[in-house]
Image (cartoon, rainbow, N blue to C red):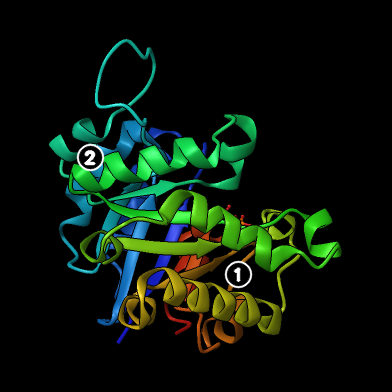
Amino acid sequence: MRKKIAAGNWKMNKNYGEAIELASSITNAQVPEDVTVILGVPYIYLKEINEIAKANPNVFVSAQNVHQKENGAYTGEISAPMLKSIDVPYVIIGHSERREYNCETPEILKEKVRIALDNGLDVIFCCGEPLEIRKKNEHESYVKDQIEKSLAGLGDEDMKRITVAYEPIWAIGTGETASPAQAQAMHKAIRDYLKELFGEKIAEETAILYGGSVKPSNAVEIFGQEDVDGGLVGGASMKTDSFLDIIKSF
Ligand code: PGA
């Protein structure tokens, strides 16, 4: 049985008061017992929201990024040992916004994945194609290449701590969602590729989340697809009611 995961990605949103209020209202809500809820919050709120989340055994925090080096002269950066030292359980790595705006290459992402795992963090690894690749019908090979370049070579124990998030860039924050059939086709392709790289058991056990304009009105259908194990949700995770509706969509 794969985990069912509803992960929120707040990106660079919410001031302190709003962040604490949102995290508290989600933590205090009834969450189905078999759903893992993850709140991807800005770094400066991690410690406090991690404490808040501990009140609910199904709710966890995630960092949205981590630096690829252990420590050193990297002004403004946050390391994996720092995250671990405040008990952060998850980190999102490879979000398309970071790939684009922060020039994070597959090689850098590979280092980030390695250092996160070495420091005991579970990783939500993002992949996904831009519109022009989808139009050329090259999305499957594009995403496989992203996975190959950043995850190939990981061991079984490593892979047990990896969740993959497929997020077509053309669907992020645009209101346009991949159709349930498009999501399922890509998730199946990803799972088949994980099988090639890591074997049947790991492929069957790895949760693959869909991201890109997930909202209460489409979550049931998307999460209902065989190879979709949940969502990585931006906009709709930043309002208590809509995120709770999504959490209940499995
Ligand atoms: P969105 O963002 O739900 O607002 O499209 C998803 C994401 O970027 O993770």
**Camera-side residue of 75 and 235:** 75
Amino acid on which disc 1 is placed: Lys
The crowd level at tag 1 (other Cα within 10 Å; few <14, some 14-19, many 20+) is many
Amino acid on which disc 2 is placed: Glu
**Camera-side residue of 88 and 115:** 115
Residue 103: x %, y % from top left: 59, 30
**Camera-side residue of 144 and 50:** 144
User: Which structural element holds mark 2?
Assistant: helix
List the residue tagged with mark 2. Answer: 48
Give the residue displayed 39% in from the left and 17% down from the top: 76
Give the residue displayed 45% in from the left and 63% down from the top: 164
Q: From where the camera sits, is residue 85 visible?
A: yes
Q: Is residue 13 left or right of residue 116?
A: right
Q: Which mark is residue 215?
A: 1
Q: Is residue 43 left or right of residue 226?
A: left
User: Which structural element holds mark 1?
Assistant: loop
